[in-house]
Image: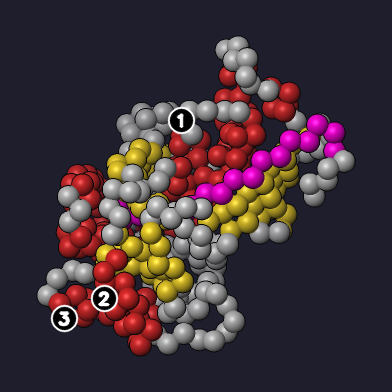
Amino acid sequence: MLESSHQNLAMVTCTAPVNIAVVKYWGKRNEDLILPINSSLSVTLHQEQLKTTTTIACSRSFQQDRIWLNGKEEDISCPRLQSCLQEIRRLARKRRNTGDPTSDISVVSHKVHICSVNNFPTAAGLASSAAGYACLVYTLSQLFGVEGELSTVARQGSGSACRSLYGGFVQWKMGERSDGKDSIAEQVESESYWPELRVLILVVSAEQKSVGSTSGMHTSVETSQLLKYRADVVVPCRMVEMIRVIRQRDFPAFGELTMKDSNQFHATCLDTYPPIFYLNNVSHRIISLVHRYNQFYGETRVAYTFDAGPNAVIYTLQEHVPEFVQVVRHFFPSEANGSEFVRGLPVCSADLSEEL
Ligand code: ADP
Ligand code: DP6
Ligand code: CO
């Protein structure tokens, strides 16, 4: 695809991490601009096991924009891809018009070839859209020399993607404006703020989910009264609380809020009509195991959260990782199927600030 024989070929490769929300985003007030009905907060997982790598080349000789995702060509006319491409090109032209002498504008008018690979299951509830669109927007910005606030651009690819542009603990403020200019991501604390915090990913199924996040949340907004209550009443208070407990590094409070928020999100999926089931029996067994484990010690040592899929993300402190991994291995012996993503096997236990 990326042949060096092309004239004026410029090429950039970047990686972007996934982020896993502890206060979930679910529901849009504007579907075109991707403006949410509530603010959300996530932890960015800076590690090797779950990331997107995107290479973008541009050349005068390319006839059209094209994209390959995990080796397969996808339709570039997808409106979300178009929003990101148009926005970055607009910002690049704006930079030229303001006379920035360092901007190399010749490339902006060239077509791009995008090649993006996720090293983890795509569309399985492990935030591939977040890492994918954050990586797309960041790589385009590097290629076209665009600087500054990019979260409003990544947001227009996939809402959760705006949070993957920052490390550590990140909030996406829902904003109030109808043009979305104040619907941005902001770092709450950096990745080094809480060094003992660890993440385990328990891959229950690498299969593509049957209801994608976009269509699932659309139906929830249309039909769930519980979602409206959650967005209007629960989340505003929970955001304040969550930021407070993170700043205090209070794991029991952080863990309890995280689990309650995951449970309420899945309750809104059940309250959607027709209902959406993202969790399966193994997910339910993981939830029970975590509660039994915490009850045994009489404190919250481990917390689960599930995005729109059956796979569990476990937050805990470093000191509890070895024992909890043993417990998981005991109850969920891994299936030797040759895959790196095996049922019940924690595929990563990562320091949030691990270098890429
Ligand atoms: P997930 O839970 O994995 O985020 P979603 O339903 O939210 O699942 O989004 C999956 C979609 O995100 C994919 O079908 C694809 O359109 C898009 N996507 C995933 N990875 C990438 C990528 N690396 N580059 C561009 N788009 C991507
Ligand atoms: C459950 O960001 O994937 O992971 O904006 O339609 O692309 P679109 O949806 P997406 O939804 C993520 C939902 C979630 C919760 C979260 O990440 O906050
Ligand atoms: Co997604």
Residue that extends furthest to the left in the rendered view of this protein: 298
Q: Position of residue 299 (x, y in %)?
A: 14, 71
Q: Residue 94, how many percent across, how many down?
A: 58, 19
* Label number found at residue 290: 2
308 lies above or below 355: below
Tell me, yes or no, whether the highlighted magenta stretch contains residue 139: no
Disc 1 target residue: 149
What is the three-letter code of the residue carrying label 3? Phe
Give how far apart the Cα atoms at labels 1 and 2 are. 39 Å
Foreground of the two, 164 or 251 = 251
Instruction: Tell me the kind of residue under disc 2.
Output: Val
**Are the residues at dot 1 and dot 3 in contact (C-beta closer than 8 Å)?**
no
Which mark is in front, 2 or 3?
A: 3
Q: Nearer the viewer, residue 194 or 202?
A: 194
User: Vertically, is 177 above or below 217?
Assistant: above
Q: Earlier in the sequence, mark 2 or mark 3?
A: 2
Question: Of the residues under marks 1 and 3, which one precedes in the sequence?
Answer: 1
Q: Which picture quadrant has residue 24?
A: bottom left
Secondary structure of the residue carrying tag 3 is helix
